Image (tube, rainbow, N blue to C red):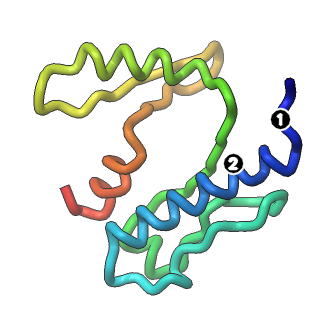
Amino acid sequence: MAIKPQSAKAKGRNLQKWVRDRILEALPNLEPDDVKSTSMGAGGEDVQLSPAARRSIPISVECKAKKQIAVYRLYEQAVDNAPPNTTPVLVVKADRKKPLAVVDAAWFIKRMAGNE
């Protein structure tokens, strides 16, 4: 059974809010208005950063919350194969596309904020 559009949007909205909250936790010097979750259907970035936030964590965030994404199975293999005290990184590449690195989002945000 397919998920209702309203439920799909709620899943995406919740992921955006999770990212926003993790960035604000990692950068306590920021104000809540420095990191905003955009409305569903709005163009551009899913999590908007103020100039102050972007100076602290120079990233652009796109969020996708879907039932199945094959990358999770691959990432689990990276986690299983990672020696103790290392950060698993999955590098994926599709035909005619540039390679992408997949890491734990919470770890990434802390690392970008200089908290790890």
Q: In this view, does 16 lie above or below 24?
A: above
- The residue lying at 37 percent from left, 55 percent from top is 109
Q: Residues within 10 Å of mark 1 (few under 14, many from 20)?
A: few
Residue 103 falls left or right of residue 43: left
From this view, report whether residue 62 is shown above or below residue 42.
Answer: above
Q: Please give left or right for residue 69 compared with residue 105 in the image.
A: right
104 relative position to 70: left or right? left
Residue 79 placement: quadrant = top left
Instruction: Name the residue rendered at 31%, 47% in the picture.
Output: 107
**x and y percent of residue 66 in the render?**
68, 34
Q: Which amino acid does label 1 sit on?
A: Ile
Q: Residue 47, position in %: x, y?
A: 60, 63
Nearest the viewer among 65 and 58 is: 65
Instruction: Kindly check if marks 2 and 1 are in contact, taking CB atoms under 8 A apart as contact.
Output: yes
Residue at figure coordinates x 42%, y 62% from the top left: 22
Position of residue 70 relative to residue 55, above or below, is above
Q: Which mark is residue 107?
A: none
Q: Tell me the SS state at disc 1.
A: loop
* Front residue of this view, candidates 53 and 69: 69
Judging by the rendered image, the residue that carries numbered circle 1 is 3
Residue 100 position in % (x across, y down): 49, 30
Q: Tell me what residue is drawn at x 78 percent, y 44 percent.
A: 8
Say what secondary structure mark 2 lies in: helix
Q: Residue 112, relative to residue 31: is it above or below?
A: above
Residue placed under numbered mark 2 in the picture: 11
C-alpha span from label 2 to label 1: 10 Å
Name the residue type under label 2. Answer: Lys
Toward which corner of the image does residue 57 lie, by quadrant? bottom left
Relative depth, front residue between 9 and 112: 9
